[in-house]
């Protein structure tokens, strides 16, 4: 090997080593900021892109994000910028934490500074209306890159920022994506588990937002623990029924991205979707609830998309239907709760005893199903 060839190889190896220790975060919200700080705590060189120059200045000068993560310090090594060209080049891992409504547009704007060796991971729990597409699909369409993943789980950003013990899931068909994310984000308080069911993990993260709204409504209406238990359990059945109809693995919903995420968002007043539901249960309009929140609650849009999709494909989803009527049809929250109790009495776990079998039993016996 010539000296020039050896120098070229050493240069490439050095570049790859630099790349593996650089993380870019697109988005200045609470979760993206918390993840940026974790990666910096782990010794990675972290750059964060934000649209707002004032927030960029605060992060760089004061190491805080008072708009979306008030009261929590950010690792001083995190460097923020409003310029893609200062954030993306050279990053081996790019975490995309942009609300679903703006997700595609931001990725498209960032595309000139991305390259195919980079790993792109969505942390957004939402659905694009056109074509009912999840965020990792948008990453594929806009980039064409081979290393695509999804990070999802019971991850309230404020608790992550407080370094409370938390677990999440990195889902990808690509082993490099899984291991790189585990290396960048795994630490003694943030555990990163792996999955190869990217679609199921991502769909679970989007769907649970629907039921967090229902749980918040139930709490505001003064409903008890029995009701909350019933609601969460039937929500899990509804989520998995819908997901399996879309090609996901039902076993995924027994893990962190399914039942784990559902429990935390249906139980915590820190959940944005829960807080929207609570405001609705108190009698506020949807616009009032959203204005009071001051942040995006992905579940509001997801309710409409999932309800329409389930109707189109004949998937039985009474909770999603009831929420749609409250959010967009003017039905009072308490009336929705009453109507849900009048829905058909079906099987408990459909993968043990199918809904169709129970309905056939009822027809054979002549018993009503309501």
Image (tube, helix red, strand yellow):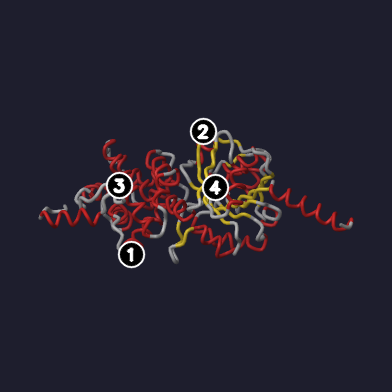
Question: Which residue is rendered at x = 51% and y = 34% of the image?
Answer: 165
Which residue is under mark 3?
Answer: 234
Determine contact: label 4, label 3, CB under 8 Å: no
Which residue is under mark 4?
Answer: 29
* Residue density around tag 1, few if under 14, some if 14–19, many if 20 or more, within 10 Å: few
Spatial distance from mark 4 to mark 3, Cα to Cα? 31 Å
Residue situated in front as seen by the camera: 253 or 112 = 253
Query: Which circle's residue, 3 or 2, is located before the other in the chain?
Result: 2
Spatial distance from mark 2 to mark 1, Cα to Cα? 41 Å
Please tell me whether residue 345 is drawn above or below residue 105 in the rendered image: above
The label on residue 164 is: 2
**Secondary structure beneath disc 1?**
helix
- Which of pointers 4 and 2 indicates the residue nearer the eye? 2
Q: Which percent across, then down, holds residue 85?
A: 69, 57
Toward which corner of the image does residue 269 lie, by quadrant?
top left
Q: Which percent across, then down, holds residue 235?
A: 33, 48
The label on residue 313 is: 1
* Residue density around tag 4, few if under 14, some if 14–19, many if 20 or more, within 10 Å: some
Query: Which circle's residue, 4 or 2, is located before the other in the chain?
Result: 4
- Which of pointers 4 and 3 indicates the residue nearer the eye? 3
**Secondary structure beneath disc 4?**
loop
Spatial distance from mark 1 to mark 3, Cα to Cα? 20 Å
Count up the numbered dots.
Answer: 4
* Residue density around tag 3, few if under 14, some if 14–19, many if 20 or more, within 10 Å: some
Question: Which residue is rendered at x = 46% and y = 55% of the image?
Answer: 126
Query: Which circle's residue, 4 or 3, is located before the other in the chain?
Result: 4
């Amino acid at each position: 090997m010539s000296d020039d060839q050896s120098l070229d190889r050493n240069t490439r190896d050095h570049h790859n080593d630099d790349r593996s220790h650089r993380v870019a975060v697109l988005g200045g919200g609470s979760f993206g900021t918390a993840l940026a700080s974790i990666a910096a705590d782990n010794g990675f060189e972290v750059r964060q892109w934000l649209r707002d120059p004032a927030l960029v200045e605060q992060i760089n000068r004061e190491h805080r994000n008072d708009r979306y993560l008030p009261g929590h310090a950010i690792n001083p090594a995190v460097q923020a910028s409003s310029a893609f060209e200062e954030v993306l080049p050279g990053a081996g891992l790019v975490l995309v934490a942009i609300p679903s409504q703006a997700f595609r547009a931001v990725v498209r704007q960032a595309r000139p500074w991305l390259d195919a060796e980079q790993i792109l991971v969505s942390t957004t729990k939402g659905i694009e209306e056109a074509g009912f597409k999840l965020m990792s699909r948008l990453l594929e369409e806009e980039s064409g890159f081979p290393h695509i993943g999804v990070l999802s789980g019971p991850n309230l950003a404020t608790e992550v920022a407080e370094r409370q013990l938390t677990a999440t899931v990195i889902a990808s068909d690509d082993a490099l994506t899984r291991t790189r994310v585990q290396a960048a984000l795994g630490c003694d308080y943030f555990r990163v588990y792996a999955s190869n069911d990217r679609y199921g993990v991502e769909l679970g993260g989007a769907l649970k937002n629907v039921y967090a709204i229902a749980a918040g409504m139930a709490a505001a209406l003064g409903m008890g623990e029995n009701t909350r238990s019933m609601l969460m359990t039937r929500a899990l059945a509804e989520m998995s029924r819908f997901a399996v109809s879309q090609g996901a693995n039902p076993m995924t919903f027994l893990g962190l991205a399914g039942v784990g995420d559902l429990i935390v968002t249906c139980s915590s007043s820190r959940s944005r979707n829960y807080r929207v539901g609570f405001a609705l249960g108190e009698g506020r309009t949807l616009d009032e609830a959203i204005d009071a929140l001051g942040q995006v609650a992905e579940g509001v849009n997801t309710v409409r998309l999932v309800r329409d999709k389930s109707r189109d494909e004949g998937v039985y989803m009474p909770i999603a239907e009831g929420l749609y009527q409250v959010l967009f049809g003017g039905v009072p929250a308490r009336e929705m709760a009453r109507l849900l109790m009048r829905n058909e009495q079906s099987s408990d776990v459909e993968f043990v005893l199918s809904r169709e079998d129970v309905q056939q039993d009822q027809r054979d016996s002549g018993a009503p199903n309501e």
